[in-house]
Image (cartoon, grey):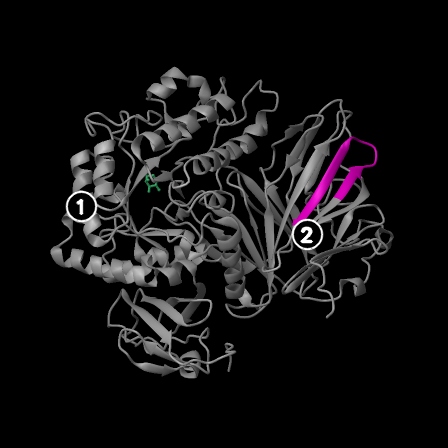
């Protein structure tokens, strides 16, 4: 038997590094100038046969050699730089000497040293045998013992595409209540910058993008996509130049920041992961979902619980008696986790005071939280608690005691947003205090779940007089990650939900230490369909918290049936957030039935393979299947009806055309080819806000089956 081709190889004669994944090849060639140059990222081929990039001498105006793997600011490079440094004598940029590769299993490091200055870099790559995702990051080291080096930009990776006639860019934009809106536009011949300057990942944009040649669709076409694992400010610049070169470079921090690299210090960037897929946007999403589930999320095999959260029901008006009432009703519906939201502590009866004072408000919880926690546990549910540990109201005991703990510049006005300031977690004493406070809350109250919120971006972040004032943009985020990691390590049963005024901090960095993310404060099911569609481009349903709330919806005023609200929320990690004390007995009974139904399909939704579908007549749907193709759940929605036209049959292309399927609710039997090619009549009722949950089971016993024909 021929030996398996190694996932990572380096040919010293050609200066060629090759990374192989099951369906793609990535190749780099060390240029004559010592800089690693991009050669190929795409379908499987023999990289050694690729022609050497043109030499710089071909053009007298600029360096037309292949794009750099991480473009340093030096020589005749005029595109966006991925590495910008300034040495003590004022010299800028790096000129590399290639020291050689280091290969360890699926990991490759291209080791570089500046030819004149004490600076070394390692361009790092990691591949795994079961995934097409390539993880990349950079490590920059000051190898001298003298003056610091100033780092103006240190990207995780630069990515380059083959020269095709055209490209489209897909990315996510939005705002509070409108996160994860998918935009797909022609990529301009220009520099396009996606960025957050907020210290948070951001509602307004996300560090994920996909490029395709303009013809990709949900189930076919070449798609190159990347995602940055960072929960603070970031920047990705895509550059399409007039001669057809398409590259992008990205990493932490936004423009205008600089960091001090001290002698002996190494700055390691977050991972910027990339994926090539020839199976369209749907295929790319499925590959990302598998990566996030197996390599990012903690405990992916553990079901995310059906939760109840009191925020929309009570706002700040929380007290023990009211929470007990809600908990009892929630338990009766089959809820597994009861989360007490904002308003339980300090002087927090509105968003104007108390943030930072993490002791239960005596008027609301005279005996502390323990009696409520015990009651929730007695009802058979876990107990979750809302915290916003990075923030403080100026009207709080914490701020009065430690006004110097917040991000501030003494000669500038302090910007308050939602009446709050940001604690500077880059200060070790603040990190220690936050960790200790949370640890005490968890230990002292039997808390099983933290909802970790962050309701404002950074302002006045560069501390005047600090030796490395912009370092807070990195160090604050690292402190947040570190505290989460420590809490999880010390409390193995503890779960954490990421939240930032809705979905303003959802990224692969925070999801590596949280179980799920609060997707948006907008719980209107019609709006949620597009929010969830955007979320699903990169992230699996398991990580997407989705609540059923009251109707009319508090954000949009829209009235929708309970079943429709459930069917939309059941496409993620289901939660309830309405004022259950106002639900009728019929509504409570229907909710209990739908929660039970969700639990039946939960393994499919949370651990299955997801396919996004559309049918004529305004129907969209999500199809979840077990990896072996035996069990299927389809959630289909038609928000509005037009002209009374019936919905077109919903085609289910992920089914096996040679198999047979039974509708588990009606008992009807279907031929797989019919469902694949002609579709199923969803029998949606007339009118707006129609929806259907369809459950199918494969009934035949084909061996060696493949999806086909
Ligand atoms: C913003 C979150 O997104 C909401 O769910 C809620 O927790 C509020 N903050 C509380 O202030």
Q: Secondary structure at mark 1?
A: helix
- Mark on residue 105? 2
Tell me which segment is drawn in magenta: 111-125
The residue shown at (27%, 64%) is: 689
Judged from this view, the residue extending furthest toward the front is: 1
Q: Kindly identify which residue carries mark 1.
A: 328
The residue under the point 48% across, 27% down is: 425
Judge whether residue 124 is colored magenta.
yes
Labelled pair 1, 2 in contact (Cβ < 8 Å)? no
Q: Quadrant of residue 394?
A: top left
Q: Position of residue 363 (x, y in %)?
A: 19, 26
Question: Whole-percent x and y of residue 548?
Answer: 27, 53
Which SS class for mark 2? loop
Between residue 282 and residue 197, name the one nearer to us: 282
Q: Residue at x 30, y 71 (%)?
A: 642
Work out whether 502 lies above or below 473: below
Q: Is 105 drawn above or below residue 266 in the view shown?
A: below
Q: For the point 14% across and 59% down, which residue is it? A: 586
């Amino acid at each position: 038997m021929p030996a398996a081709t190694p996932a990572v190889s380096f040919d010293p004669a050609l200066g060629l590094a090759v990374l192989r994944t099951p369906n793609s090849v990535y190749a780099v060639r060390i240029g004559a100038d010592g800089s690693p140059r991009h050669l190929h990222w795409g379908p499987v081929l023999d990289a050694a046969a690729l022609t050497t990039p043109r030499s710089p001498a071909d053009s007298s105006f600029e360096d037309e050699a292949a794009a750099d793997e991480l473009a340093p600011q030096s020589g005749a490079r005029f595109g966006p730089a991925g590495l910008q440094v300034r040495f003590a004598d004022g010299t800028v940029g790096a000129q590399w000497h290639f020291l050689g590769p280091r290969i360890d299993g699926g990991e490759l490091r291209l080791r570089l040293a500046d030819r004149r200055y004490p600076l070394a870099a390692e361009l790092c790559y990691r591949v795994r045998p079961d995934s097409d995702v390539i993880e990349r990051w950079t490590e920059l080291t000051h190898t001298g013992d003298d003056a610091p080096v100033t780092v103006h930009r240190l990207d995780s990776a630069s990515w380059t595409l083959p020269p095709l006639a055209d490209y489209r860019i897909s990315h996510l934009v939005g705002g509070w209540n409108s996160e994860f809106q998918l935009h797909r536009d022609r990529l301009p011949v220009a520099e396009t910058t996606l960025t957050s300057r907020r210290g948070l990942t951001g509602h307004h944009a996300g560090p994920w993008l996909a490029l395709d040649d303009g013809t990709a669709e949900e189930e076919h076409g070449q798609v190159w996509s990347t995602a940055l694992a960072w929960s603070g400010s970031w920047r990705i610049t895509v550059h399409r130049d007039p001669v057809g070169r398409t590259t992008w470079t990205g990493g932490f921090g936004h423009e205008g920041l600089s960091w001090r690299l001290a002698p002996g210090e190494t700055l390691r960037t977050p991972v910027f992961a990339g994926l090539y897929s020839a199976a369209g946007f749907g295929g790319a999403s499925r590959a990302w979902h598998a990566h996030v589930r197996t390599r990012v999320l903690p405990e992916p095999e553990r079901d995310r619980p059906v939760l109840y959260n009191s925020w929309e029901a009570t706002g700040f008006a929380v007290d023990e008696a009211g929470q007990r009432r809600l908990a009892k009703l929630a338990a009766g519906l089959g809820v597994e986790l009861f989360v007490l939201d904002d308003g339980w502590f300090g002087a927090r009866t509105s968003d104007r005071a108390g943030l930072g004072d993490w002791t239960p408000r005596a008027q609301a919880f005279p005996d502390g939280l323990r009696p409520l926690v015990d009651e929730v546990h007695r009802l058979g549910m876990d107990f979750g608690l809302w915290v916003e540990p990075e923030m403080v109201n100026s009207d709080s005991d914490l701020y009065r005691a430690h006004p110097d703990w917040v991000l501030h510049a003494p000669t500038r006005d302090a910007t308050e947003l939602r009446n709050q300031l940001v604690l500077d977690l880059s200060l070790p004493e603040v990190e220690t205090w936050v960790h200790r406070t949370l640890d005490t809350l968890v230990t002292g109250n039997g808390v099983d779940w933290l909802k970790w919120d962050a309701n404002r971006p950074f302002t006045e972040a560069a501390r005047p007089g600090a030796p490395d004032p912009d370092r807070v943009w990195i160090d604050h985020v690292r402190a947040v990650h570190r505290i989460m990691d420590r809490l999880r390590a010390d409390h193995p049963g503890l779960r954490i939900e990421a939240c930032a005024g809705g979905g303003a901090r959802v990224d692969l960095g925070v999801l590596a230490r949280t179980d799920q993310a609060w997707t948006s404060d907008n719980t209107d099911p019609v709006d949620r369909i597009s929010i969830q569609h955007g979320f699903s481009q990169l992230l699996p349903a398991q990580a997407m918290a989705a609540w059923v709330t009251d109707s009319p919806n508090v954000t949009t005023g829209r009235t929708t049936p309970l079943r429709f609200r459930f069917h939309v929320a059941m496409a993620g990690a289901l939660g309830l957030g309405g004022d259950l004390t106002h639900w009728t007995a019929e509504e409570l009974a229907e909710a209990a039935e739908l929660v039970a139904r969700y639990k039946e399909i939960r393994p499919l939704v949370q651990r299955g393979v997801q396919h996004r579908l559309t049918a004529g007549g305004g129907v969209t749907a999500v199809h979840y299947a077990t990896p072996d193709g035996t069990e299927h759940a389809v959630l289909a929605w038609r928000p509005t009806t037009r002209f009374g036209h019936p919905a077109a049959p919903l085609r289910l292309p992920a089914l096996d055309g040679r198999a047979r399927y039974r509708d588990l609710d009606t008992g009807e039997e279907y031929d797989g080819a019919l469902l694949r090619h002609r579709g199923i009549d969803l029998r949606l009722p007339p009118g707006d806000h129609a929806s259907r949950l369809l459950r199918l089971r494969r009934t035949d016993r084909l061996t060696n089956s493949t999806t086909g024909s």
